[in-house]
Image (cartoon, grey):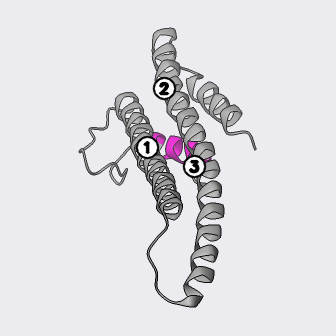
Amino acid sequence: MDPIQDLYTFVETTRRGMDTQTSNIFAASCGRWLRYYLFLQIIRARFAQESEAYTTEIYQYTERIQRSLSSGPRNMAPEEWQELQHIQSLEQLIHLEIESFYTFAKILLDRIADTFSYFYSVPLRKKDHHTRNSPPSLKASVLIAGPWLSHLIC
């Protein structure tokens, strides 16, 4: 499954029957979805690298500390303190990626909600983007787009 191709298929399928101006506005709006989706893919890749580095370093650090504590409590050596600071900086990078993912995922979902709200004249309340009272055509479009969105978390 190629999520980008799925998005193009969704856009082309949905654009059928629209006049030219509406079709172009819809395509441009969905193009913004792709922008944020690609940002999320970059963030996921960076997170994977940073998480792997952190896991490796924290495991090695823990092993060394446990071995050194076998002789009893002691003060940290300067190089151990530097290593711990390095590990903490890796933690910060991981948390940055998590927060970035959340921020861009929220933007993407807001842009998707804005698109459907505009094209189906459904007013959205800021914290309530459900479709309980929405037209059937909107519900169908959300179902079509749903599989594409699932790629964000897989």
Boundaries of the magenta span: 137-151
Task: Provide residue 31's location: percent of width, then percent of height.
Answer: 53, 23
Q: Out of 122 and 33, give the one closest to the viewer.
A: 33
Spatial CA distance of label 1 from label 2 is: 17 Å
Q: What element carries label 2?
A: helix
Q: How many labels does the image show?
A: 3
At 45% from the left edge and 16% from the top edge, which residue is drawn?
Answer: 25
Please name which of the two marks, 1 or 2, marks the residue nearer to the observer.
Answer: 1
Spatial CA distance of label 1 from label 3 is: 10 Å
Residues at circles 3 and 2 in contact by the CB criterion of under 8 Å: no
Spatial CA distance of label 3 from label 2 is: 23 Å
In the displayed structure image, the side of residue 152 where residue 84 appears, left or right: left
Name above or below for residue 6 compared with residue 80.
above
| Quadrant of the image containing the N terminus | top right
How crowded pointer 3 is (Cα within 10 Å; few <14, some 14-19, many 20+) is rated as some
Residues at circles 1 and 3 in contact by the CB criterion of under 8 Å: no
Within the magenta stretch, is there residue 150?
yes
Q: Out of 4 and 139, give the one closest to the viewer.
A: 4
Q: Mark 2 points at which residue?
A: 32
Amino acid type at image mark 2: Arg
Q: Is mark 3 on a helix, strand or loop?
A: helix
In terms of secondary structure, what is the magenta stretch mainly?
helix
Q: Name the residue under label 3.
A: 47
At 32% from the left edge and 32% from the top edge, which residue is drawn?
Answer: 121
Residue 26: assigned label: none
| Quadrant of the image containing the C terminus | bottom right
Amino acid type at image mark 1: Ser
Q: Mark 1 points at which residue?
A: 100
